[in-house]
Image (spheres, grey):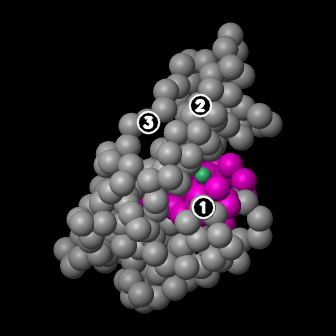
Amino acid sequence: MFTLISLPYSAEALQPVISSETIAFHHGKHLQTYVDNLNRLIEGTEYASMSLEEIVRSSQGGIFNNAGQILNHNLYFTQFAPVAQHSEPSEGLAITTALILNFGSVEQFKAEFEKAGTTLFGSGWVWLSADKDGKLFITQESNANNPLTKDLRPLLTMDVWEHAYYLDYQNRRAAHLQALWSIINWSEINRRYIG
Ligand code: MN
C-alpha cells in the first residue's frame, strides 16, 4: 500500500509562488487520486511488493501511469522550501560545480531548463537528471514518464501539467516556471546529486 506523502512545509509556505489552493488540489486531490488508483490496480499482483521505482521500471499502462505520477510528484513536492528560506546553488555544493561544468553557468542552466519546460507540448515534466558518472541532462518527459526509465537519476523537476499552475498562472506557464526557482531547496537537490 502506498500512502500520500506529507509535505515538509505548510500549505501556505510557498505563497505567492504556489498558492495554498493549488497545494490543496495538487497534493490533496490529484496526488491522492494517483495513490488510490495505484493501490487499487496493484492489489493482488506482483507489483504489490515492489517499490515505486521498481514499478515504474517494469510496468505499462494504468499501473505505470499512476506509479510514475506518484514518484514524480513525491520528488516534486519534496524539492521545495518555504519562500522565506530562499536559496540559490551556492559555491561549495557539488551540484553547483556540476551545473557550471555541464551548462556553463547556473543562469545558463536555468534558461535551458525553462526553455525545455515551456516548449514541452502537452502534459508532462521537465527534469534535471544525472547519469552514473555525474553528467547532467535536461529532458522533457511526457505524461507520467520519469528519466529513470533512461537510466538517469532524477534530481529536480517542474510539473508542466496544467493542474500544477492553472489556478495561479492560468496560461502563463513560462511565468510559473520562472517563479519556481525561488522555492527550490538546493540543499535537497545537492543531496540527491551526491546521493
Ligand atoms: Mn501534477
Residue 160, percent from left and from top: 63, 64
Return the residue nearer the eye: 79 or 83.
83
The residue type indicated by label 1 comes to Leu
Dot 1: element: helix
Mark 3 and mark 1 residues within 8 Å of each other at the beta carbon: no
Counting residues from the N terminus, which is met first, the one under dot 3 or under dot 2?
3
- The three-letter code of the residue at mark 3 reads Ile
Q: What is the secondary structure assignment of the residue under circle 3?
A: loop
Q: Secondary structure at mark 2?
A: helix
Identify which residue, 138 or 14, lies in the foreground: 14
Residue closest to the eye, 112 or 165: 165
Q: Amino acid at mark 2?
A: Val
Residue at image mark 2 = 35
Is residue 31 rendered to the left or right of residue 185? right
**Which residue is at 68% across, 49% downward?**
144
Marks 3, 1: nearer the viewer: 1
From the image, tell me which residue sits under label 3. Answer: 5
> What's drawn in magenta, residue-wise?
139-165
Query: Which circle's residue, 1 or 2, is located before the other in the chain?
Result: 2
Q: Is residue 190 above or below residue 28?
A: below
Q: Which mark is residue 167?
A: 1
Res. 116 mark? none
